[in-house]
Image (spheres, rainbow, N blue to C red):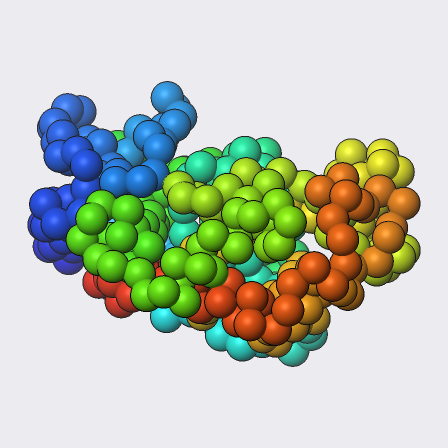
Amino acid sequence: MKALEILTVSLLLILINACKKDSAEDPVVTTTDGHTHIHIPIPPGLPALNIPADNPTTVEGIALGRKLFYDNILSGDNSMSCASCHKQSYGFTDSTLQFSVGIDHLPGVRNAMPLFNIGYAHGFFWDGGAADLESQVIGPIQNPLEMHEELSNCISELNNSTVYPPLFQIAFGTSTITTPLVMKAIAQFERTMLSANSKFDKFQLGQATLTAQETNGMNLFSDPAKGDCNHCHILGSTFTDFEYRNNGLDSVSADSGRARITLRSTDMGKFKTPSLRNIEVTAPYMHDGRFQTLEQVLNHYNTGFHYAANLDPNLQAIQKGRMNQQEMDDIITFLKTLTDHEFLSNPAFSKP
């Protein structure tokens, strides 16, 4: 129990220190019901977080969720954790792997998504198969290509451990561990994983200057006759609208995407628009990781996209070959200003 107390105090100090440097608001801390409630410090440039009423953010809950996120106990053979496929230095994606490999040494079918700023999303996974942040927690645990564990076994193992019942008592007021409490703890930790301290953000605050090439890339990014990136990856804030689109990767998509959830043919091959923050370190790109470089991504949107039946209207309206090589290079240079180096090494998100 003492270990978690040390961890919670350390986490609180890290959050407060980060808030003093980068946040637009102070972390309001109150102690009620034996829990230390905290308003997550929001960096300038990001909107307010919507915290569910049934899962208020506490220092104890965050600390527990962080421990669970890095613990192999959640997998079928105790060899993998959430962090095995979501590594901090890669924006919480799976290094440079196209597909993560699960405990049975089988590859997945979609590229591991980054986990920063996901508290703002209104659907989770590439196809929106989970409605909220709490629900998405159990998907990888049960997936036979990932952690391949039965929830009943997972909960039994946690309850039978000497470590976790006291920690859940501190975080939630009960030593009886349930699936909803595991979901809530990990979701609390994931909501704190906010990234908005890149060179671009500092430029927005008047604390940094963009080079001529970066500035030109930013202008091209939003130019509807050139990059036209701004329709889906809105400049600033989260750099995504979290919507689902068919971006012309194939004439006929082999992966049904959003249609797997909605069962609507009009959603065939549609996938969530990912954030462009930290895009420099989150390769490979697209839901299937088919592009290894940002150059390949820009080439796709410039000349390579297919006219699928439900191609996004923004791509239908754009002219192929509208950008020259220098213009694409400038956009890539701008995209690299979105790397938040502090986030990628922030001790608040590392293994406890």
Quadrant for the C terminus, please. Answer: bottom left
Q: Nearer the viewer, residue 172 or 192?
A: 192
Q: Nearer the viewer, residue 55 or 160?
A: 55
On the image, which quarter does residue 43 sit in? top left
User: Which residue lies at the image location 37% right of the left edge and 55% below the top edge?
Assistant: 68
User: Which residue lies at the image location 46% right of the left edge and 44% below the top edge?
Assistant: 235
User: Which residue lies at the image location 69% right of the left edge and 48% below the top edge?
Assistant: 271
Tag count: 0
Residue 302 makes an appearance in the image = yes
User: In the visual, does 254 lie left or right of 70?
Assistant: right
User: In the visual, does 18 lie left or right of 256?
Assistant: left
User: Which residue lies at the image location 15% right of the left edge and 24% below the top edge?
Assistant: 32
Give residue 323's position: percent from left, percent from top: 65, 63
User: In the visual, does 103 lie left or right of 45?
Assistant: right
Give residue 77's position: percent from left, percent from top: 54, 70
On the image, which quarter does residue 172 sit in? top left
Residue 175 makes an appearance in the image = no
Which residue is situated farthest in the top direction here?
Answer: 53
Give residue 92's position: percent from left, percent from top: 43, 62
> Relative to residue 313, is residue 219 depicted above or below?
below
> Relative to residue 81, is residue 23 depicted above or below?
above
> Relative to residue 67, is residue 20 depicted above or below?
above
Give residue 26's position: percent from left, percent from top: 13, 34
